Image: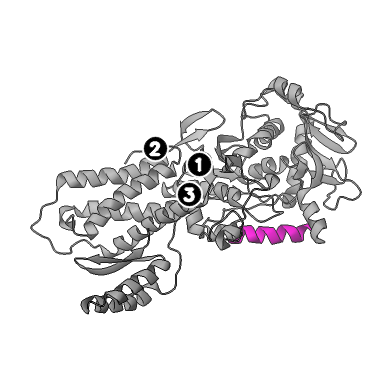
């Protein structure tokens, strides 16, 4: 199979064939959470999106270094460098040290990501642990003439940078529009232009989180940490920078400017990839709008917008059923449909475990046309992933492949009609994509096979005795648990209710 991975590059605004700078090595940096609250569905979408990209790159044989940061300082309430640090504000409200807040919510984030089967990044740096690197980068930007110091704070000079480079090339904005549409906020008089941004802020007397620097006791600007940490762990140029679409401007735009201004080289990242937002009734889901749902609430069902609890794998499938660059609208109906889709794929795994290729040769000759059709179906499963990580298209292709798997299981297609290589390709493709690339897994429900084996024996006995009232009771009770009984010519089996 010679399919090549193509990814949409926000920087060039087109799909490009993925060609690493130093194959087979791939460097990928993704903006992680600001840890001052529990993760919500929006956080999950970004994490799952780049988890699948990470998994698929490794599936293709690349040696990936995946860096995802934790923001634990410098993210102020207002993106225009004003307001209180979000973590410090939370610490005051809860009468805690800021790093107690950081550790508490970082641990919760890790727990929820584990529930969603999101792999840990290879490196997870914190902003507060890289103050030295950020101070060094600020000094480089100052030395190159793209920043200025005022009263102990250091600001990036967007006008000076734009004269030699192009501020706004990622988001498509131009500096004239920014000048015309940006108002001066109170407390920003020390900036030369309202759209200049802080590299270092002098701490007020009441500011808890502070470090010494050549300019003042203070703290780094929010945008700076990602530029400094991506450079430390991936070098001045690397392959992929990812994050949510809401970070494209100003955060990622400022990252590009900082990296270029400090090193006087081309863009730090070759491919910029952004996942779209989750919406509720067409409006972005987020903390600032008060319409977000924490993952813990989704898992427990404890939220006024929820009709029931939804398992982590249901949430993961809900995210994967849409292309990452499209908006994904929340609704109970969509989540319930996702549960059905997820259980259908899990039932496919159960069926595959029961299928085996005959050890002895038979007189039945393989059907060339059927084998060609099935191999094409397996190739279709990869086509979606290679077309800008289109998991929705891949899932649709897996469902098409599953129809044939079920036909094999029900005896509608004789396994002997398949060549051994075709059978192995079907099995390996389905299992590899569902489990290792899409990252879906069967959720634990106790010793299901042993218990259900006993229940099905009672069910079979009731049928043989024509005790149909007992048959109906067993069916109904299992259905409440999401289990469907399958009466087949070959015997009685069970499957997840779809």
Image quarter where the N terminus lies is: top left
Magenta segment, prevailing SS (helix, strand or loop):
helix
Relative placement, left or right, of 439 versus 383 is right
Tell me the SS state at disc 2.
loop
Rendering coords of residue 221 (x, y %):
76, 41
Q: Is residue 415 visible?
A: yes
In this view of the protein, which residue sits in the foreground, 350 or 419? 350
Mark 2 → mark 1, Cα distance in angstroms: 19 Å
Tell me the SS state at disc 1.
loop
According to the picture, the residue beneath numbered tag 3 turns out to be 334
According to the picture, the residue beneath numbered tag 1 turns out to be 324
Mark 3 → mark 2, Cα distance in angstroms: 32 Å
In this view of the protein, which residue sits in the foreground, 35 or 236? 35
| Precedes in sequence: disc 3 or disc 2 | 2
Q: What's the magenta region?
A: 97-111
Q: Residue furthest front?
A: 469
Crowding at dot 3, Cα within 10 Å, few <14 / some 14-19 / many 20+, comes out as few
In this view of the protein, which residue sits in the foreground, 270 or 481? 481
Q: Tell me what residue is drawn at x 59 percent, y 45 percent.
A: 30
């Amino acid at each position: 199979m010679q399919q090549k991975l193509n990814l949409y590059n926000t920087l060039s605004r087109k799909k490009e064939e993925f060609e690493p700078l130093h194959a087979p090595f791939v460097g990928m940096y993704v903006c992680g959470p600001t840890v001052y609250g529990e993760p919500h569905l929006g956080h999950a979408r970004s994490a799952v999106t780049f988890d699948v990209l990470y998994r698929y790159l490794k599936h293709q044989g690349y040696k990936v270094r995946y860096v995802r940061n934790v923001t634990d300082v410098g993210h102020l309430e207002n993106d225009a460098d004003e307001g209180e640090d979000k973590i410090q504000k939370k610490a005051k409200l809860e009468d805690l040290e800021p790093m107690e807040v950081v550790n508490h919510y970082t641990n919760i984030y890790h727990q929820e990501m584990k529930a969603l089967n999101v792999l840990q990044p290879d490196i997870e740096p914190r902003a507060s642990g890289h103050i030295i690197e950020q101070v060094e980068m600020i000094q480089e930007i100052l030395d190159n003439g793209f920043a200025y110091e005022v009263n102990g704070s250091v600001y990036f000079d967007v006008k000076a940078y734009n004269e030699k480079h192009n501020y706004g090339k990622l988001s498509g904005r131009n500096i004239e529009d920014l000048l015309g549409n940006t108002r001066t906020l109170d407390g920003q008089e020390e900036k030369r232009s309202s759209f200049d941004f802080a590299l270092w802020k002098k701490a007020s007397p009441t500011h808890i989180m502070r470090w010494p620097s050549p300019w003042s006791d203070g703290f780094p600007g929010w945008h700076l940490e990602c530029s400094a940490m991506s450079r430390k762990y991936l070098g001045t140029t690397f392959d992929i920078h990812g994050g949510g679409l809401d970070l494209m401007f100003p955060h990622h735009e400022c990252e590009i400017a900082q990296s270029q201004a400090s090193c006087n080289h081309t863009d730090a990242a070759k491919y910029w990839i952004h996942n779209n937002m989750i919406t509720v009734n067409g409006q972005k889901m987020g903390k600032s709008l008060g319409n977000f749902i924490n993952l813990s609430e989704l898992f427990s069902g404890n939220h006024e917008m929820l009709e029931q609890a939804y398992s982590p794998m249901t949430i993961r499938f809900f995210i994967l059923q849409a292309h990452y660059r499209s908006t994904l609208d929340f609704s109970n109906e969509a989540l319930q449909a996702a549960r059905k889709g997820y259980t259908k794929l899990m039932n496919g795994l159960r069926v595959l475990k029961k299928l085996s290729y005959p050890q002895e040769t038979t007189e039945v000759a393989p059907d060339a046309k059927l084998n060609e059709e099935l191999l094409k179906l397996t190739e279709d499963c990869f086509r979606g992933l290679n077309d800008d990580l289109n998991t929705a298209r891949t899932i649709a292709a897996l469902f098409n492949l599953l129809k044939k798997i079920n036909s094999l299981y029900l005896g509608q297609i004789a396994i002997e009609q398949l060549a051994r290589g075709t059978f192995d390709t079907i099995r390996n493709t389905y299992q590899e994509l569902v489990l290792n690339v899409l990252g879906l897994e069967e959720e634990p429900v106790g010793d299901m096979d042993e218990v259900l084996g006993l229940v099905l024996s009672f069910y079979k006995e009731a049928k043989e005795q024509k005790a149909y009232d007992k048959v109906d009771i067993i069916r109904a009770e299992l259905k409440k648990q999401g289990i469907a009984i399958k009466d087949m010519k070959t015997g009685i089996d069970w499957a997840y209710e779809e």
